[in-house]
Image: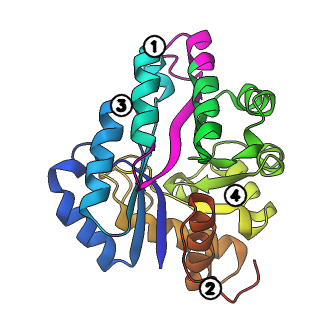
Amino acid sequence: MFFDSHAHLDLPPLSEAEDAVVRRAHDAGVTRIATIGIDPESSAKGLEIAHRHAGVYASVGLHPHDASRLSDDTLSRLEELSRCDKVVGIGETGLDYFRDRSPRDVQRAAFREQIRLAKRRSLPLIVHDRDAHEEALSILAEENAAEVGGIFHCFSGDLAMARKAVAMNFLVSIPGAITYKGAEAQVAAVRGLPLSRLLIETDAPYLAPVPHRGRRNEPAFVRQVADRLAELRGVAPADLADLTTANAARCFGLRVPIPDVEP
């Protein structure tokens, strides 16, 4: 039983084959998927998809690339969408100092507003953080984001950063990049954190794991992420799958059976 904690089912090419993508996921044992919003339109589409499929949930948010769209109307629309019954989180939001597609001060403002929205709605945050580790942690601390906690998605930091995130009530979500060469810092984080603080994700349609690298990613491939984490931690893949599913369910406020294995 696998939970892909972060995918983008509303984006092409996944959106062009929605039913087939969800069916392949189920056939691979991926029984739950969180489809993640990146702007109001994406968030609304994700909700429509979630309502069409059992086991699919949605988040609503404004990606740092689109932070320049921040306005009272945008925030009001996200808050309205967040009240739908299949919404399990706010985001993805955060900071991206690698692409810098929105001015950094605007990214920071959008991040803070969405943290406040998450706290108003008592929903976890889905945090995008690229080349902005310390500032992302600092803003979360200043805004008391530990009150709701959440997920550092597509984790790209090291073990020291991961421990800081965990101390602030966040989980660390590992994508297919853990199967690539050059992922030593993330490998150390996976080995050094309690299993109870780890999640798996695809970030589909991006970052397909080996042996699918170079192809479009999809939720069915989260199994390869789980297999790599199980190898790194010396646990059975089935136990790793059940543990990360239970972790995601707790974070998102969902109910699943709790595995009888050491966390």
Of mark 4 and mark 3, the one earlier in the sequence is: 3
- Picture residue at 38% right of the left edge, 68% below the top: 55
Depth check, mark 2 against mark 3: the one in front is: 3
Of the residues shown, which amino acid type is indicated by label 2?
Answer: Ala
Callout 2 secondary element: loop
Numbered mark located on residue 45 in the image? none
**Residue 84 position within the rendered picture, expressed as x and y whole percent measured from the top left:** 39, 49
Of mark 2 and mark 3, the one earlier in the sequence is: 3
Disc 2: which residue: 236
Of the residues shown, which amino acid type is indicated by label 3?
Answer: Pro
Of mark 2 and mark 1, the one earlier in the sequence is: 1
Of mark 4 and mark 2, the one earlier in the sequence is: 4
- Can residue 130 be spotted in the picture? no
**Residue 14 position within the rendered picture, expressed as x and y whole percent measured from the top left:** 24, 51
**Residue 110 position within the rendered picture, expressed as x and y whole percent measured from the top left:** 56, 21
Disc 3: which residue: 40
Q: Are marks 2 and 1 in contact (CB under 8 Å)?
A: no
- Front residue (pair 122, 211): 122
Disc 4: which residue: 187
Q: Considering only vertical position in the picture, is 135 above or below 60?
A: above
> Which residues lie in the magenta part?
83-109
Q: Are marks 2 and 3 in contact (CB under 8 Å)?
A: no
Callout 1 secondary element: helix
- Picture residue at 63% right of the left edge, 33% below the top: 115
Q: Quadrant of residue 57?
A: bottom left
Disc 1: which residue: 68
Q: Are marks 4 and 2 in contact (CB under 8 Å)?
A: no
The residues tagged by marks 2 and 3 sit, at their Cα atoms, a distance apart of 40 Å
